[in-house]
Structure formats: structure tokens, C-alpha cells
Image (cartoon, grey):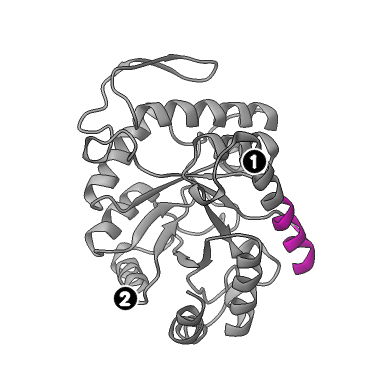
């Protein structure tokens, strides 16, 4: 099992820099931040952009993977975003993990869009396909329902080390069948938050169902399951995974049993959401994570 820590972009950098350094010093494998105009969980909170936050995080760390949790078509055009992705990957020395998903309702409304869910999923599929091409090829042209590109140059990339099989990793967030199919087709990783549930057992049932659908999609595509990294956001469950060290250990065990290779928890906050103490995080880092790797 590998372990990730999400740090919300709500703090001025004078405070946030120490958190990103600490995530690396604690031994986390990857660290993430939310990519929203406004996050529905904290609509009145101060909020900073994901891309410059991760660029700054790359400058104060050396080893830890850095990812968007997750970026979406709500606030990115694939051509423009390709440039930001290449810059982040370069600044981080190849540590960037590109988490992408359909996007939330609040950002969509803020940006003045009124797309039905079916259309948003269709847009996400087109967004992902074009972004994948832009990160893998040069002189890209596309005419789609949602996006147009005209002979787009992708220098200095478009891929790491000139290896067409080594572009920036795509971690595709997916719960529905069409997006799961997309994750299996184009993703280096699949990510899920499970869904909304009233109890922890109901939430784990949702997660298990998504995992089974990924297994079926992999089999149908003839793809080796070992080629797809599986990330679980532990903290959409009713109980915050860092409520206690025992809660975290139980959640990781259940995730491993469902085939997840990576889990992600959140930096503790003094108020909800993600309310717990720093002492719990320190206990998890010192005792639980070393035993579960």
C-alpha cells in the first residue's frame, strides 16, 4: 500500500509551505490539493489555485509525488491546461500526478454552465482524450463537440525524456460506467471517492461495487489489472479516516482487500470537515503506516 495526503489550498503560502514539507518528511508517497474555483465543502473559505500551489510545493520538496485532486473541464481548457501540466511536471522533476474528473456542480454553476450530467460526462471524455493526445503527440488538431484545437505545438514536451510511453500519468476519477471505461482505456490510475452514504458500511459497499466494475472493465479490455494504479479517497466515508489511528488502520485494511494500491487521507483541520488533531496524524505516521506498507 502507498499513502497520500491531501492539503486543502485554503492557507496562505507562508503557512502552507510547512505542511507540504511535513508531508514529505512524514514519508507520504504523494500529496494532493483540490482544484476548484470554490469547493462546496468550504464555500466561504479562503481558496487558492491548485497549479501555482503545486508549483510552490515542488520547490519546497524533493521526492514526494504531487497531484491535482482533481482537475476538470469546469475550469480548464485542454490546450491551455497542457501547458500548465508540462510546466508542473518540469518544475517537480517528473513528480506530477494529473488527477482529472468530471468536476463538481458548484464550479459548473459559478462558471455559468448549465450542462446536464450526461453532457458533462461527454465533455469530460472529450477533454480527457484531447488532453491525452496533447501530452503524447505534437501538431495536434481536433474538432469536437466541446473543444477545438488547430495544429497545437506541444514543445518542450510532449513526453518525459522523449519516450512516448512515459507521458505525465493520468489518474482518472470515475464512478459511473462510462468514466470507468475511460479510466481503463486511457488512465495510468483510477481514483474514486466512493459516493454519498449514510453509514460507513454503506459507503464501503459503494466502493466495492466500483472496484468490481473496474475489474470487469479491465477484463473486457484485455488489460492487466496490475497496470492500473487504484487510488481511494478514504475521507468521503461518513467517518473521517484520521478520527483515530485504529480507524485509519481499519480503513486501509478494507481498501487493500478491495484491490486498492493507494489510499489518500487529509491534513487535519481544527473544524469540520476533516476535523482531528495533529497527534492522530503523527501516530498514524509513526506506527500505522510503517506496518501497512
Magenta-drawn segment: 197-209
Nearer mark to the viewer, of 2 and 1: 1
* Residue 95 vertical placement versus 238 (above, below): above
Q: Position of residue 263 (x, y in %)?
A: 53, 64
Q: CA distance from mark 2 to mark 1?
A: 39 Å
Q: Is residue 118 magenta?
A: no
Mark 2 Cα shell of 10 Å, populated few (<14), some (14-19), many (≥20): few
Q: Position of residue 178 (x, y in %)?
A: 66, 33
Q: Residue at x 27, y 27 (%)?
A: 154
Q: Is residue 201 magenta?
A: yes
The numbered dot on residue 25 is 2
Read off the residue under disc 1: 219
Identify the image quadrant of residue 27: bottom left
* Main SS of residues in magenta: helix
* Residue 263 vertical placement versus 76 (above, below): below
Residue 199 is at least partly visible in this image: no
Q: Residue at x 31, y 33 (%)?
A: 164
Amino acid at each position: 500500500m502507498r499513502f497520500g495526503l491531501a492539503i486543502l489550498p485554503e492557507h496562505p503560502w507562508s503557512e502552507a509551505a510547512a505542511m507540504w514539507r511535513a508531508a514529505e518528511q512524514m514519508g507520504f508517497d504523494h500529496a494532493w490539493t483540490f482544484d476548484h474555483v470554490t469547493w462546496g465543502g468550504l464555500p466561504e473559505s479562503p481558496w487558492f489555485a491548485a497549479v501555482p500551489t503545486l508549483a510552490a510545493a515542488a520547490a519546497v520538496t524533493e521526492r514526494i509525488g504531487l497531484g491535482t485532486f482533481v482537475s476538470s473541464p469546469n475550469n480548464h481548457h485542454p490546450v491551455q491546461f497542457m501547458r500548465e501540466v508540462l510546466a508542473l511536471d518540469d518544475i517537480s522533476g517528473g513528480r506530477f500526478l494529473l488527477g482529472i474528473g468530471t468536476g463538481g456542480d458548484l464550479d459548473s454553476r459559478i462558471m455559468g454552465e448549465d450542462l446536464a450530467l450526461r453532457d458533462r460526462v461527454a465533455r469530460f471524455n472529450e477533454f480527457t482524450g484531447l488532453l491525452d493526445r496533447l501530452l503524447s503527440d505534437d501538431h495536434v488538431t481536433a474538432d469536437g463537440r466541446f473543444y477545438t484545437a488547430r495544429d497545437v505545438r506541444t514543445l518542450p514536451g510532449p513526453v518525459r525524456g522523449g519516450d512516448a510511453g512515459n507521458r505525465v500519468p493520468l489518474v482518472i476519477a470515475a464512478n459511473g460506467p462510462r468514466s470507468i471505461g475511460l479510466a481503463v482505456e486511457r488512465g495510468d490510475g483510477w481514483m474514486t471517492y466512493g459516493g454519498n452514504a449514510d453509514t460507513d458500511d454503506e459507503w464501503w459497499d459503494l466502493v466495492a461495487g466500483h472496484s468490481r466494475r473496474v475489474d470487469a472493465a479491465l477484463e473486457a479490455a484485455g488489460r492487466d489489472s496490475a497496470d492500473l494504479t487504484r487510488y481511494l479517497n478514504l475521507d468521503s466515508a461518513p467517518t473521517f479516516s484520521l478520527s483515530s489511528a485504529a480507524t485509519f488502520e481499519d480503513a486501509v485494511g478494507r481498501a487493500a482487500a478491495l484491490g486498492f494500491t493507494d489510499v489518500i487521507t487529509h491534513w487535519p483541520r481544527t473544524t469540520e470537515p476533516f476535523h482531528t488533531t495533529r497527534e492522530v496524524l503523527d501516530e498514524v505516521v509513526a506506527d500505522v503506516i510503517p506496518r501497512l506498507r
